[in-house]
Image (cartoon, rainbow, N blue to C red):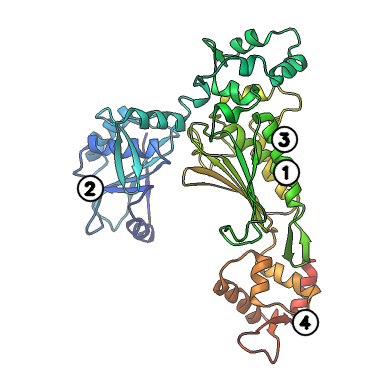
Amino acid sequence: MIQSAKISDNEVEKLLSLEENHFCDFKAIEVSPGKLTKALAAFANSEGGELFIGVDDNPRIWRGFESIEAANAHVQVFDEFFPLSTEFQYTFLKNDSAQGIVLKLQVAKTRDLRRASDSKIYVRRGAQSLPVTDPDRIEILKRNKGIVSFESELVPCPKEIVTNSTHIIEFLLEVVPTAEPENWLQKQMILIEGKPTVAGVLLFSEEPQAALPKRSGLKIYRYKTSDSEGTRETLAFDPMSIEGNVYDQIKESVEETSRIIESVRLHTSEGMIPVNYPTEAIHEIITNAVIHRDYSITDDIHIRIFDNRVEVLSPGTLPGHVTPENILAERFARNPGIVRLINKFPNPPNKDVGEGLNTAFESMRSLKLKPPIISQEGGYVKVTLRHEGLATPEESILLYLLKHDEIANRHAREICFIDSENKMKRILQSLVANTLLEPVPGRSRYTAAYQLTEKGRQAANKYS
């Protein structure tokens, strides 16, 4: 049953002010239900979104259905192709001052590919719902959804690279001492018709990068800056390449990343201190990047170490119905074979299958650091570990001044991880207005700094 909700005049105003974009669309009531299924399919096949039926454009006005019954034709079509579920939620919106009833359709990213009433597949690009007809693009969509996986593709190379490698022999001696490599690999479906699969090469060959060039490596960068982007000038050394099978690659990249981080120093309220990230967080995030990346994409995993953060970029979008918002609660493996088999290795990197990112969040919290940020950027899943305390900027500034005589805008931005000079200026002015800080006397506009008042010192002592 579709729910009804009465919304306020203010909520109506906010709704009408929304822009049509990748996540939002408006349609008039005259648009045919069949045409509307294109937008619903596009949202479902992309990152989800909201569709409002009963809102005119140019000008944007609320002009809904005369009654709930008047929307029956739409509801019947939607129910056939996109039945009510956790993925598709419909609500009738009412307002005492507005004309008619607007039907709101909330669409989540779905686990499978959805087709519109014309049997075509659509995706959302900006404010448009575009058809996808090219077989190669449909295959990419299926991989993004997790319907098919590149890890099952056969690699045109001799079977001996996995049946006679050091890795498979050591693995079987440790895990299944009575098994023969070729028979065991065939039973695991990673050796098919005499050819290894992508998963088999990544797990057991000596040099996966030779068989899968430019799509199975990992690079580590160290940028001596806290800026939003690193540059060639701020590179501490040439990018470091980590190769080998995925088990060794995870181990070596975690060790190298931790080693590099040990050399980083950060300006904080305590002065220059060594950067300290929980090893568990680094391990889990790198493990996730390696075992869940999209190996059909020709690119490496990139680990970028800045003065104040670590960024891990894994090629591919989040698989299936997983989004940055639900990733801690949902489980979906793009490469289930790799996930399952690497868990059989001695001391597997994914000991707690499905709990890796939760562990990373918990370990950051245990060090009183802000949680990781997970985002999708330009075809990558990006996870950022920030060396940023849970304290507010105001608390960080007051604590800094307990050990230092004064603080300038530039130093305040460094310890609070705030890029904007104007934003920091407003924070400092607010502290002055609350008589927690005062300007250092006799300073010019260009050398301005601030010091604690007695009230500020008392407040800072409470935080320490």
Q: Nearer the viewer, residue 202 or 69?
A: 202
Q: Amino acid at mark 3?
A: Lys
**Residue 168, percent from left and from top:** 69, 18
Which badge, 1 or 3, comes first in the chain's sequence?
3
Which badge, 4 or 1, comes first in the chain's sequence?
1
Estimate the spatial distance between the alpha carbons at disc 1 and disc 3, rounded to whole Å: 9 Å
Q: Amino acid at mark 4?
A: Glu
Is there a contact, CB below 8 Å, between mark 3 and mark 2?
A: no
Estimate the spatial distance between the alpha carbons at disc 4 and disc 1, rounded to whole Å: 46 Å
Q: Which residue is mark 1?
A: 256
What label sits on residue 251 in the rendered view? Answer: 3
Per the image, label 2 sits on a secondary structure element best described as loop
Image quarter (top left, top right, bottom left or bottom right) of the N terminus: top left
Q: Which residue is mark 2?
A: 28
Per the image, label 3 sits on a secondary structure element best described as helix
Few, some or many residues within 10 Å of mark 3 (<14, 14–19, 20+): some
What label sits on residue 454 in the rendered view? Answer: 4
Left or right, 14 with reference to 432: left
Image quarter (top left, top right, bottom left or bottom right) of the C terminus: bottom right
**Residue 133, percent from left and from top:** 29, 31
Few, some or many residues within 10 Å of mark 2 (<14, 14–19, 20+): some
Residue lying at 60% horizontally and 10% vertically, measured from the top left: 187
